[in-house]
Image: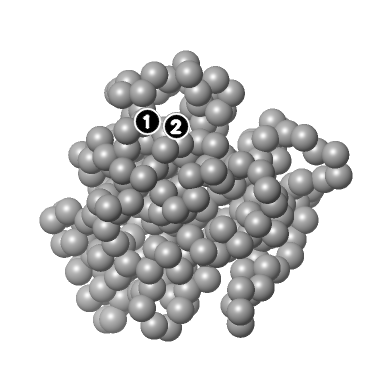
Amino acid sequence: MKIHPDAQEGLVLIGDLTVPFYDTGAPYDARPTVVLVHGTGGSASTHFRTLFPMLTTRYRVIALDLQTTNGELSLGYLSAQVSRVIDERAPNQGVHLVGYSLGALVAADLAADRPATALTLTLVAGWVRAGTQQKLRNRIWQRLFETDDNLLREFATLTAYGPPFLASKTDSEVQALIEARQFPAGIAEQMKLNRDADLSDKLPKVLAPTLVIAGSYDQMVPDRQSKLLFGGIANARYAVIESGHAVPQERPAQLFQIINEFLTIPEAFPRGQVQERIHI
């Protein structure tokens, strides 16, 4: 499924690696550029299929499909892909980075290493390093991945969405969510990175105005973990959306609203500010 009718699709080469990108930029398009970085097991289309077109109403939007490796995976390996796409598609300009889940860690890693590139940084359902609950879920996920794909789909659906969202669905709709869940090549390496990644040394280097967004019902990344991310970045503000981990799927309009407000007038969100609930 094409992510957006106006999006150019192409590949950026990094050595032997090919990274797909999607870019709504057109000649003489002077709008600010937003770069979207997806999370574990996802793609630009699966994680941003609703948010992407909303953002295109006001911004040039670039997204990419992160590529994994059969060996050790690192945040630097993934952030280098984002950097290369930015350099190819939006050279010599600052961009607004938006990262979701593992993509939040990748975006923060890039912002720390390339402060001139990140005009702002929005981190959705991210964390600094995995806590006990995250590691436990990760171990259960790994065992199911090795033994029972069907049960893993149920477990992943249960933990991805918030209870109110699932309660709003019929049994057949929940079953459709379960059956639609895929485990693409490289997801095991991404899950290992979820467990092992640590941004502690990078966060002091993040200079961009940053918005940290947590889901109040997030079972994958409890909001206390996102608060550690918020506390580790000097120029950060924090908001909670009533959602599970799948914020872009559960609450895309709310997510667009708060991102747009932040990008339009960053100073309207003073650093250190905490908004416990965002409604639309």
Type of amino acid under label 2 = Pro
Q: Position of residue 83 (x, y in %)?
A: 56, 58
| Comes first in the chain, label 2 or label 1 | 2
Tell me, for residue 98, which label it has, or none. none
Nearer to us in this view, 124 or 197: 197
Q: Residues within 10 Å of mark 1 (few under 14, many from 20)?
A: some
Please state if 138 lies on the left or on the right of 76 as rendered. left
Corner quadrant of residue 269: top left
Type of amino acid under label 1 = Asn
Residue at 55 percent of width and 28 percent of height: 263
Rendered position, 34 above or below 234: below
Which residue was labeled with disc 2? 209
Which residue was labeled with disc 1? 235
Corner quadrant of residue 193: bottom left
Residue at 31 percent of width and 24 percent of height: 272
Q: Position of residue 17 (x, y in %)?
A: 59, 77
- Label 1, secondary structure: give it: loop
How many angstroms separate mark 2 from mark 1 (CA)? 5 Å
Rendered position, 20 above or below 30: below
Q: Is there any visible trace of residue 168 in the rendered image?
A: no
Nearer to us in this view, 213 or 157: 213
Q: Quadrant of the N terminus?
A: bottom right
Please state if 162 lies on the left or on the right of 124 as rendered. left
Please state if 157 lies on the left or on the right of 173 as rendered. left
